[in-house]
Structure formats: C-alpha cells, structure tokens
Image (spheres, coloured by chain):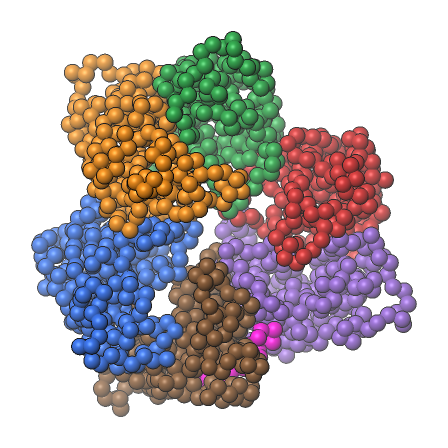
Chain colours: A purple, B red, C green, D orange, E brown, F blue
Amino acid sequence: MHIPLVKDKENVMKRSDGRADEQLREVQFDVGFAPNAEGSVLISMGNTRVLCTASVEEGTPRWMQSEEKDGGWITAEYAMLPRSTGSRVRRERNGISGRSQEIQRLIGRSLRAAVNLELIGPRTITIDCDVIQADGGTRTASITGGYIALMLALGPELKSAAIPRSAIRQPVAAISAGVVQGRPVLDLCYEEDVAAEVDANFVCNGAGEIVEVQGTAEGETMTKADFDKLFAYAATGIEQLIEMQHSVLKREGISLS
Amino acid sequence: MHIPLVKDKENVMKRSDGRADEQLREVQFDVGFAPNAEGSVLISMGNTRVLCTASVEEGTPRWMQSEEKDGGWITAEYAMLPRSTGSRVRRERNGISGRSQEIQRLIGRSLRAAVNLELIGPRTITIDCDVIQADGGTRTASITGGYIALMLALGPELKSAAIPRSAIRQPVAAISAGVVQGRPVLDLCYEEDVAAEVDANFVCNGAGEIVEVQGTAEGETMTKADFDKLFAYAATGIEQLIEMQHSVLKREGISLS
Amino acid sequence: MHIPLVKDKENVMKRSDGRADEQLREVQFDVGFAPNAEGSVLISMGNTRVLCTASVEEGTPRWMQSEEKDGGWITAEYAMLPRSTGSRVRRERNGISGRSQEIQRLIGRSLRAAVNLELIGPRTITIDCDVIQADGGTRTASITGGYIALMLALGPELKSAAIPRSAIRQPVAAISAGVVQGRPVLDLCYEEDVAAEVDANFVCNGAGEIVEVQGTAEGETMTKADFDKLFAYAATGIEQLIEMQHSVLKREGISLS
Amino acid sequence: MHIPLVKDKENVMKRSDGRADEQLREVQFDVGFAPNAEGSVLISMGNTRVLCTASVEEGTPRWMQSEEKDGGWITAEYAMLPRSTGSRVRRERNGISGRSQEIQRLIGRSLRAAVNLELIGPRTITIDCDVIQADGGTRTASITGGYIALMLALGPELKSAAIPRSAIRQPVAAISAGVVQGRPVLDLCYEEDVAAEVDANFVCNGAGEIVEVQGTAEGETMTKADFDKLFAYAATGIEQLIEMQHSVLKREGISLS
Amino acid sequence: MHIPLVKDKENVMKRSDGRADEQLREVQFDVGFAPNAEGSVLISMGNTRVLCTASVEEGTPRWMQSEEKDGGWITAEYAMLPRSTGSRVRRERNGISGRSQEIQRLIGRSLRAAVNLELIGPRTITIDCDVIQADGGTRTASITGGYIALMLALGPELKSAAIPRSAIRQPVAAISAGVVQGRPVLDLCYEEDVAAEVDANFVCNGAGEIVEVQGTAEGETMTKADFDKLFAYAATGIEQLIEMQHSVLKREGISLS
Amino acid sequence: MHIPLVKDKENVMKRSDGRADEQLREVQFDVGFAPNAEGSVLISMGNTRVLCTASVEEGTPRWMQSEEKDGGWITAEYAMLPRSTGSRVRRERNGISGRSQEIQRLIGRSLRAAVNLELIGPRTITIDCDVIQADGGTRTASITGGYIALMLALGPELKSAAIPRSAIRQPVAAISAGVVQGRPVLDLCYEEDVAAEVDANFVCNGAGEIVEVQGTAEGETMTKADFDKLFAYAATGIEQLIEMQHSVLKREGISLS
C-alpha cells in the first residue's frame, strides 16, 4: 500500500535530531587513524563512525590471472564491532552473514567505479570498513570514507607517476534517503531507519551520475515520484560530501581535479 | 565515464535475438511442475527456466516468536543447478555464496510486499527458486514465478476463508533492464547482460508502484535520464507480466481482483 | 527376526499401485532437458523424476595427477530439490549429509564400471543427479539415467573417434527390490520402501553381471533364499531398463553394440 | 569385464600370509581396554586392531522424541587414528568424510539388528570404533567388536532385569570376502583388498541370516555365482566369529543363549 | 640451549625506543570510546591500541544452567582488525585461529579472578578486545584495559548496590617481559618480541599475587633465575598499571578500595 | 583471594591415591604400540594413557617454503578418544576446540626445543597424541611420550648419519603441579585437578632449564612463593622422567648422551 507523501511541511513535526529534511548529519574525517595502513580514515556521520583502511598488495586475485585480465583490482570487506550497536552483535566467525556480504559487495563495486582498473597495474587494493559505532547509514559512510582511504593509498603512486593521473576517474560518495512517516528525508539515523517505509541508498560520482542505486520498500511500496524526490535530496547531499572529500585530500597533499 | 544513450534508433543494429528494445522474451508458466509442493510453477522467460515452489509450514521462525510478532512469514531460497549454465557451476555445499544470498533476500522482500503478513496466521511460507536453465534474469523470473507459486499455495486457504482475501495486497512481478552499447533495453539475455554498461532490476506491483529497485553500473555510471528510461521500459514489461500472472491464476481457479 | 516369505501369491493383496510383484513402474526418458549440459536426461520411473546431466571437463582431479594415473575420471553428485518430497527437505548447504554422500559415491562407482577409464583421455566427467520428485528408488533412477547422460556426453567424441569405441564396456542400469509384508517385490515406491522389512539395490551390466549390490534389513534380517529371489527380480528388471537405454540412445544416433 | 574364477586350486599361489582361502585371520578380544566406557573391547583380526566402546546415555535423540517413538536408539561413530595406516591420514576435523559416514552408518544399522530397540528403554547407546591399526576389514571388525562392547554395556541392565532378556535378538558379526586374482577369499588383508577385483562385506546374525550385504566391483563385475561363493565363505567365517563372541561374553559373565 | 643473561648493563646497547629495561611504554586510557557499550576504553601502550568493551547481558550461559551453578559469568573475545598490523591480516571468518582462542581464553580467566562470580547475579559479561593497532603486548593490554571496561560496566550496579561491593576482589593487570639478546626487558614492542629468546606474560592482582603466568622459550630455554628476573620486572610494571587503573576509575567516579 | 599454603604436613590428609606430595604416579612406556608409525609409544602415567606417534614426511610446510626457511619442522596434534573420559566427549569433527588447539600448540613448541630444526633437513615430523584414557595430566604425558616417539622416529636417521647427532639438543619432559586444598602437590590426577586452586604445567629439558611454563589460578591467585614450590617439585619430577626416557630409548638402541 502506498502512503502518500506529506505535502504541507509547515504542519509536520521536526526530525528527531532537529535537522531539516534534506540536511546531512555532521561529517568528520580523522585521517591516519590506523597508521599501519597505506590509507586510513575514521569517518563520522553523526553518531555513525566507520574505520576505513586501504591495503595495497602486489599481484591480482587468482580469478583475474586465470581470465588473463590486465590491470588491478579493488575489493572491500565490511564488519561491525560487537559493541558498535545498542545491544551486542555476534562476530561473524562461522561464515559471513548475507547482510555483510551484500554491503561489502556494494562497497567494492562503488569504489571500482572511481578508478580505471586497467591503469593501476597488477595491484589488489582491499578496503576494510569496520564499524566502530552504528547509527544508520554505515554502508554509505563506508563508501564515502573508503574513497578517501583509497586515494590516500594511491597518493604516493600518483605523485611518483607509478600510476598515471588518468587512472582516477571521478570521486565517489554515497548517502541514504528514505520516506519516514510519509515524508522524504536525507541521511537517516538508526531511529528513522527503523521507522522508514522506504529506504534507499544512492552512490553517485562527481558529475552527479549514478554509480549504484538500491531502493527497498519492505512491506510497502513507493511511487516513482517518491523515488525522484529521494534522488534529488541524495544528489545534493552527495555533492556536499564530494566537496568535503576534496578538501580532506587536498589537505593531505592529494589534488585530483 | 558516462556513455551517452544512442538517439537515432534507425541506425543501430537489432538485438541479438531480434527483439525490439522494450520487448519481453517469450514467457511460459508450467503450473504444478513439482506436484509435492503446495504451489509450484516452472517459469520460462526465453531460455531462462526457474522452478518455483511454495512450501507452507505451520508456525513462525524463532526470531518472530522471540519478538512476539503476530502473523506469518515469507522467505525464499535460490540456487542454480550445476548445469543450468554453459560451464558447470559448483553446488554451494560449504556455505552459500554472496550472490545467492543477495538474490534470495531480494526474492523474499519482494514477495512479502504482496501479502499482509499479519493476516496469514502463524505460517511460514518458503519460496524455493531452483534455476534449471540460466540465460539472464534468473532473479526477476524467480520473483515473477514465485508470486504464482505463492498464490497457488495460499489458494485453498483463501477459498476456505482460513485466510481472508484482504491478506493479498497486490500482485508483484519483476524484470531486468539495462544499457547495452549505449542503448536501453528490456529483459536482458545472458549475452546482453555480460555486455551491459548498466544493469538494473525492477520489482513493481499491480499499481505500478516500486517494491524494489537495484541499479548498478559496474565500472561505468548512468545519468538520471538513463535510469528514468529503464524504469519506463520496466514498468510496461511488468504490467504485461502481471496480466499473465492474472490469467494463469484464473485458469487455476484463483481470482484475486 | 526373519519374516518368512509369503508362498501363496493368490491370497495376498495387490501392490498399492496395482503392479505385479516383478513389474517395473512406467519409465520415461526426456532427453536434452538441460540443453547446456554435454548430456542430459530427465528420467521418470513412476512418480520418481531425476534430472541427470553429464559435464565433461578437460583435465583430471588432483589426486590422479599426484598418483600419475593415466586416463580420465567419472564422478557423481546427488541432491534432492527441497520440494521433491511430501514435506520440504533442507538444502545441504553446510556440508553434505551421510545419505547423499553414500548415494553419490554409489552412482560414481556404478558408472565407472561402464567405461574403461584409461581410454577416455584426461577428462573428468561429472554426473549430476538432481531429484525433481521423489517416490522411492531415486538412487537407482540416477544410475539408469546417469548412464544415458554419460553416453550422450561421450557420443560426439566416439563419433569423431577422439575416444575409441572400446572405451565403452557395457551398459549399466540399476533397480531396487525389497521384501514388503513378507513378499518380495521389484522397484519399490516410497510407500512400499517405508514399509519394507528388507531393502536392496542392484546395479548390473548388459551381461547380467553384478556391478554393485547393497542389501539392508534395518531391524530385521533376510535369508539367503530371500536375497536370491530379489536378485532374480532385479536381473529381469535391469534387462528391460538396458533395452530401453539402448532404444533411447539409438534414437539419439548413438549405437554402442 | 568379468574375470572368471580360478577353478584349479592346486595350481594357484598361496595367499600372501599363507592362509587357506576360506580361513579367518587370528582373532583376539582385549576386553575392558577403555575402562571408563560402559563396555569396551580392543578387537584384533590379524594386524587390524579397532577399539570399540559402548556409551550408554539416558534419553533418546531429538528426532525420536519429535516422532514420539518409544524405546531407545543405537548409533555408531567410526574414525581412524592418524597412524593406523602406513602413511599418515589426516584427522577429519573439518567435516567427516564420505567413507567414514558410510562405515559408521553401516555399523549402526548392523548393531540395531541385534537388539529390539523398543525394549531397551529411553536410552541412547553410542558405539565408538577407533581404528588403532588398519590392515583391511576395519568396518567388519568394528561390527564384530562393537557387538561385544554393546553387550558388555547392556550386561548389568540385563542382570538387574532393568532391560528384559528378550530385548536381545541375535548375535551379529561381520566379515569381508572378495575375489583376488580371480580367486574368492575370506577376510582380506589390506594387500589383498587393494588388489581385489571384487570386494564384499557381509553382516549376518546367529541364525545365518543376512543383516547387511554390500558388494562392489569397482571397474569390474562379478557373476551371481561368484557372489554366492563369497557368501558361502562369509557364512562360515561369521559362524566362527559368533562362537568366539559367545565365549568372550560368557567369560565376562554374560550368557545370552 | 640456554643463553646466559648479560651481566654488565653499562656495555649493552639501549632498547630500540630508548627505554630502560624495566620501563613501561607510555600508557593512555580513552574512556567511553564505544559509547554504546556498558563500559569501554581504548587503551594505548606505546603504539599498541586495543578497544576494550564490556557488555552486560541478563542470564547465564547454557552450560552454567545445566550445571545449576549460581552467580554470573565473565567471558572474552579477541580479534585483530585487518590493518592493525604492518601487512594486512585476514579476518577470522571461517573459524577462529588457535592463537586468538588462546588469547581470549587467557583474558577471560584473568578477569574472572577480579570478581567473585557468585555475587554478581545471573549476568553474563562479555569483554570484547579488538586490536586497532598492534605493536606487541596486545593480550596483556587487553587484560589491563578489559579490567577497566569491566569495572565501568559494573559501576552503576555497584552504586545502586544491585551488586555488593564485596563482589570485587582485586584489580587485575598484565604485562609482558622477555629476554632479548640475552637481556631481560619489560613490556616488549613487536620488534623486540620477534627477536626475543624468551617471551613471558604475567597477570597479577593488586596484592602482587600471580593470576596467570605463561613463559615460552621457542627453540631456546631459560633458567629459573632468568624467569625470576622477568617476574620481578613484571611485578613492578603491574603495580604501576594498577595505580593508573585506580586513577582512571576514580576519575569516572568508581572507587573500589 | 590467596589461600595460604599448609605448613604442617603431619596433620594433613594423605592424597587420594596415597602418594606423597612430590611423588609421580607410576609411569610406563609401551614402545611400538602403533607399528605403522615411524615412532610410537603408549605412555601411562597412572590411569592416564596417551598414544604418541611420530610421522616423518619429506618436505616442509608451505609457510616455511614461502619464508625460505632452511631445515625442518615439528608439529603436533592432540585429541581425546570419546571414551577416554568418565562421560563420553564429542569428537571435534566440526572444528577443533580452543582447549585442543592450546594443548597441541604447547606440545609442538615443547618438542621443537628438543631439536635443532636447521639440522634435520627438509622434513616435517608430526607428533600425534591421542588420549586413550584421561585421568589428569594428558598434555604433559603427551610431551613426555611425544619426545620418545620423536626420538624413535629419528633413530634410524641418526644411526645412518642422515641427520647429525648435534641435531638433538636436550631431552624434554613435562609434568603438572598444583595447589590442592592449600597444599602443593606434583602430578595431579583428575580428582585433584578439578579441586585445585592453582594448576601449573612445567616443561623442562635435561639441564633443568625451563622450556615452557604455564600457571593459572582460575578464580584464585598464588604467591610467588607458591609458584617456586611448585617449580621445585616439578623440577625433581621431570628429572626422573628424563631418566626413564633415557632408559627406554637405550633399550631401543638409541643412546643420545
């Protein structure tokens, strides 16, 4: 059953944390949080905090070798620390869950769109996203932070011209949007996420093009018009995130534009 | 890098199987293929064939009981037979793959949107989707066929009024669409799927509303305009599929409208 | 405790499906059911239906290489679809069950007896037997159908003389027999199988010789005379099955005698 | 290809260890080898040594409870110590092998035939068979020794009449037989087993009736006449083993006849 | 072979980071780093950083219930983030490693000595130790930090007298010591750990008594005199750590003495 | 809480089996119990019996090859037979337990101290320790017996000078000691082990030097003085064990001093 969007914004209650509907939570980047990694950042979006590291290893995965593919590969892993959440979650020690698999596959695909894999040489870059604190939007924070870790790891190679500047296509960032109590909002916190009728994640690049989009309306549905509204909010949010990525990387001496 | 859509349709080559861009493959429903199941259908969409069965079990999963949730549950499992594909694929005997997990979670979420779970009583319905032959679009065929198996299984309960008619919300069907060589097309076969720059799956209901949407542009991107075009194709395709579902179920004595 | 065989056939009830004691169920072969496989057949024996496919891969298993064995290898896998049975059975996704292992090892050994492995070159042929519908005798149907899938897969190689005709030894087929309510019968359906005091499976070749025999009397015993009677029934049944295999293969242009 | 049986015994070579064709290896029973078990015996048949223990636990397996079956249950586990063999075999620590599963299922079925499960009360008896030294025939030695361990464990209950004497049906023992270089022989050692064209295992009871029979002719076949000859040898061997079991148990104060 | 201890300290080189032999690295406690946990601290000992959280759950493990044990339980889990180390380590997703098991068992035993389990009521407290950065001594840092997380989690219960003050026995802390190039040193960094002939871990309480001691001389040996020297260093180090724990907890309003 | 040691020995009860505090249980070595192994011994320490075998394989583990380490490797595996204990313990078939891992890692490290790995050539020696009967001290019995199995396996190589005599460093043996009811005792049986406040295991070499030491005071603590007392007892016990090892090996023609 489709729940019609609320039209008259004046009469609706504010969001639980007082944000405007199309407003991002406060974003912070703590660069170099894991000094052993080639690139690392602790990204905070409100109370969601994810440690993103990029590890560069020589060589490519076996499947690329057997398919005789040139270039390199980017892959991702995602996990939640047991007390990232309000009640303790079990470690995935006897096989990874379906949810974690889905998320890490999404992160990997999204970040591969940022780079021309054929130009980075026979390297495998693993983006590890470990959720320190979870308050909604951990997968999109992983992508936005993962992009920074990736660029930090590639920085020295770009400076030394071991990898050509043309290997970097476009910045990539991601954000969630959803319909909560009939009202489209951007960057849902956990409380909103649980209550949402519709939940969507958008991954876009610096040109405003779509890299990935996933929308689900568990038990409900949404009209195309709802979806378009969510996309509009997300496009603006991602534009802001990409500007922040740009500043952070510039501060670290990596200028990609 | 965004590849602009081809504008002048006259000059482009036809699709490999001669279909128009917005044309579905031939669809067939072989009802009752697995007579032991409460509901079953072998759906064919071109050379893609999936056996969908619905199994009704009394009782609900443990997590529903511990959360003291009323009503019932619908879940799905998905697997490919080893020779559904051109070269043999291994059985997933030591843990399910990330791909299979993603697909079966999508099938489950999609079919739960067809039903008001609170009204079906303490039952668990499992939709098993086993791919006999794979030629692209196995997950969307699983959803379209799974809906029929589900309704066949619920049919006797609806007739006897053990489950109220209002428990059925809307029919649900699904289709893929993508951009192949810069050109949006509907219902991709495997050959097109492999070559596609953009690949999307749409799940809609009988009212044309979105249940699920997933779009990915591995290594590429798409504009919002591309995406809207794909959605338009998909909406028309799903409308046709829902009509066919309607006919098949009517033939089996199940009229839901 | 041994239950003596019923002597006076006149006075006993007919079998549940009206068959004579030594009578096979209706047998059908749907050749090419899985067109992607090198060889495939959907075998039906009454309500038991098994999809048998043969996959030919270049190269031999690692253990053959490390033992420096010449020739090729034939192996088998067996699984039941979740709704092949009256109530849903779980997929074996976290390790294969003892029962499935036993059955697929039996299928593999039986079919290796049909071929001189040293003459088929460094190839591995996998026979996949997936039970679509189970009504007793799935393992013997798998062997009988698996032989056809195997020969269909080898057919082109035999025609092109890539594999010599002498690589094919003898046709192989299998059937069950058992003692039900003190009375020996051939080709047990599920209802009979559950009630049987003694359950045996026979695999024989075209010369009437034994390839494999397995007899079990869970909780009961049988005399050697019982066993001999079961063997006699099975020998006749297998003879008929081998004739049918012969016809099917001839129709497909494969003449082995 | 069937290899005809050697007719003229005079002209053939003796067996590697000098035994006559129908002669058992030397059998020994070291009762109480594992004093913590309710019943235990280290059985030696030539150089094959298996430690068989019987453990009695109150209660029945969950599946019996949910099927509301009365009585008790007997099950078995089988494993080889790493250096029971000439070259070290790996422990089965990440899932049991198909071979071990087959064997332990055979042991369990065979020993259940010795007892009327409905009369032993709600008990689960586990027969553990751990191969200390392997020289062929470990599964049949496990059954023959397992029967003794089982009776030793039930002994006190029989004496106290907690379990009625009628719960014990018949003694059960087992032996291998095979065709080696065209010649049927009893109780194959490893060297003969490896060279055998035909390998069969027979489980019989004290009345000479068949409990289980398994015959395989990997890569070869056998005639019914071969099989009958093997059965005849086995029947004599098992008769001797049952006499020995009788003596051993009598010595331990358990008289069952 | 025993390598004699260096006697003349004047002539030996300083430690790689300039510390005296019996000197701890700089210790820091970042309390509340994981705000969702009942207790949390990020402990740093030099470049080793471990996030320790304490989770309190109602109820006790199943084994305690079946043994009808009163009181509560404390257990621990330990893991390294992939880029805690110089080169990426794999996540333990398909079973935990022997090393991790040993460490988390040690942490659990050590912290259980700090508390009288019978007096904390039917609660299970899980101490999660996730290594953010590894530079030697991660297991001892986990114990020292884990004690703080544990007390923070118990703090409110102690204040409200839901748990009596007498449930807390003694503070517990831990430190490593070893023999490097013939010279006993305290609190080894990774570089020293790799080069050490002898490696020992000491867990002591506030009374200077031993809770756990583990000493290993992989490929080498140590005299009892060596061991006594290591113990003396460790005792002093642990005394300092327990003072720091005391200050940190006092600052958080938890005074236990 | 530290329980003070009992001072006045006269007034305390004797140990449950009448031994003096510093007295070993009766020790026996049954050499060659597993004749297929390169070296084997069934060691008995009182009612604890462990079958130790040594298997020599050519080549080194993959990790040694990739680290380009010279010489050979010694590793160990440990398991308990199901009825080594009073009530049946499960086989570790779905992953090894933390306890078994800890023990087999300890056995491996201890025995590697007996040999100069660089001098034994590219060989891997696996020490398998299978507990036939468990009455406390199975890990220390495994080390003491494992040393004999190891030397028996190396014996022929030493005689033929394929491995130089200098490859053997020192004999290694192990024993437990603990504080039971406030009283330090040597070589705890199971009954004492369960009741012990403090439990320690000592591994020493022929020169009385420490190879490994592990002391734990689950729920309690011990003073350094307690620990020194336990060490003194253990040192005497190990001296006796090493003398026995010497005699056994000499009897087998292996003289190492």
Query: Residue F65 location, x and y as percent?
Result: 34, 57
Q: Can residue D240 be seen in this view?
A: yes
Q: Can residue C153 be seen in this view?
A: no
Left or right: F101 in relation to B2: left
Residue at position x 83%, y 54% in the image: A2
Left or right: A11 in relation to F101: right
Q: Quadrant of residue D239?
A: top left
Query: Residue B164 location, x and y as percent?
Result: 80, 43
Quarter of the image containing the N terminus of chain C? Answer: top left
Q: What stretch is highlighted in magenta?
A: E24-40
Q: Is E191 or E117 nearer to us in this picture?
A: E117
The question of residue E35 being in magenta is answered with: yes
The correct choice, above or below, for E11 with respect to C88 in the image is below
The correct choice, above or below, for C54 with respect to D86 in the image is above
Residue at position x 66%, y 30% in the image: B35
Residue at position x 43%, y 73% in the image: E112
The correct choice, above or below, for C66 with respect to F2 in the image is above
